[in-house]
Amino acid sequence: MKKLFTLIKTYPSTTALLCMLAVAVPLMLSPIGALAINPIGGQRIMVMDGMLWYNAEYISEVFTQLGAHGRQVYLIFHVFDCLFAVTYAALLMTILKPLARAKWQWLLPIVPAVFDITENTLIQIMSAQHPAFWREFCSNTPLLASIAPVFTLLKWLGFLACLVMIVVLLVQKRKRPRKLLLFDLDGTLTDPQEGIVNAITHALHQLGWPAQPRELLATFIGPPLRDSFADTLGMPPELIEPAIAAYREYFAERGIFENKLYDGILELLQRLQAAGIPMALATSKPTVYAEKIAAHFGFAQYLDYIAGANLDGTRERKADVIAHALEVLAPPPGTQIVMIGDREFDVLGAAEHGIPCIGVLWGYGSREELASAGAQQIVRTMDELLEVLT
């Protein structure tokens, strides 16, 4: 069951389409659905429901033949019809959401569903009041008979508006400049505090260095490891390489997975990918570790490339990592490149290449740190970030 919910969350458009088909097929195969697509003789009336035109006299005769079960069959048909409208609206919403920029646009597909359900409710009221429903609909209930087609017309105008908006948004999307997003890893996509702090504690113990507060060791998240050992702890140069070796001894086996994704990251990446925006990772963590983390937590599939540091200590600075990512990805001229990270190192590294950086506040950097470094924008939530990036 948990895997099912994960699939639904990861592929909402496909799920909505399957739901719509699951409702549509029984609807078309139901007795009323079969009659509706095979009308014979009689006077047609201006009532369209479930995407079908009905023949009043013929269906009335069939109701008579069905006897006591006719009304139940008709009620079941309209339940399916309402479900069809809702799932169709859900499908449109999942298509629109990664394209739309205003939240009200996502709600537009709900309007046709409301009209459809209201229309069916009116028809059920008329059916309860008049046993010979379809004949009475035409002759004895002129007011309701005129209201229901109005709701039908509004329903289809709503569906048409949704489809037109999808076309418009797709055209606008094609006109937008191509984008490339570079994501930091630690503190942006994942929270690595437990693994990193434990690995540093292990390294200090191995070297006989005095134990340090975990809060202090958490500041190692973000900058290159060599800089943190030297600047934060004042470690002499001759001990830095042994410290890094002891750190990696623990981190490679245990610390690498003492880590967790921030809530909403997979959905964010999935929506950005659905919007057609290429993404890559730019991290000061060694590439071999970054690749294992991305594969383990299931977000490697959304990335075009994973750029990280080398184990030999080269390409550790964020600016060097970004330069390597750009060399490999070779974005065409005019591409809007954006860095997303949680520390000043991300902002400053991107600035060396003239790339704007969006700072996120769910990581380890403060608003003051990001603002003073020159972050173009600072966001608090995944939804804010998605709105800015799309």
Image (cartoon, rainbow, N blue to C red):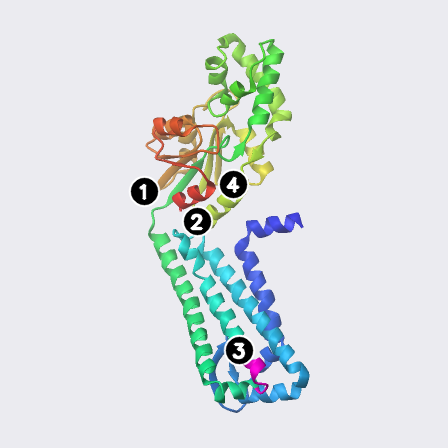
Q: Nearer the viewer, residue 42 or 241?
A: 42
Can you tell which quarter of the image residue 83 is in? bottom right
Q: Residue at x 38, y 64 (%)?
A: 164
Q: Kindly state the secondary structure of the residue where label 3 is placed.
A: helix
What residue is drawn where x is 67% and y is 86%?
67
Earlier-in-chain disc, 4 versus 3: 3
Of pointers 2 and 4, the one earlier in the residue sequence: 4
| Three-letter residue code for mark 3 | Ile
Q: State left or right for residue 373 relative to residue 213.
A: left
**Start-end of magenta stretch:** 125-132
Label whose residue precedes the other's in the sequence (2 or 1): 2
Whole-percent x, y for residue 256 in the image: 60, 28
| Front label number (2 vs 4) | 4
Number of the label disc, if any, that sits on residue 276: 2
For discs 4 and 1, the disc positioned in front in the rendered view: 4
**Mark 2 Cα-neighbour bin, 10 Å: few <14, some 14–19, many ≥20:** some
Q: Which residue is mark 3?
A: 123
Q: Which residue, as the protein is rendered here, is positioned at the far front?
A: 129
Name the residue that disc number 1 marks.
Answer: 334
- Which residue: 51% across, 85% down? 137
Considering only order in the chain, which callout, 2 or 3, is on the residue closer to the N terminus? 3
Callout 4 crowding tier (Cα within 10 Å): few <14, some 14–19, many ≥20: some
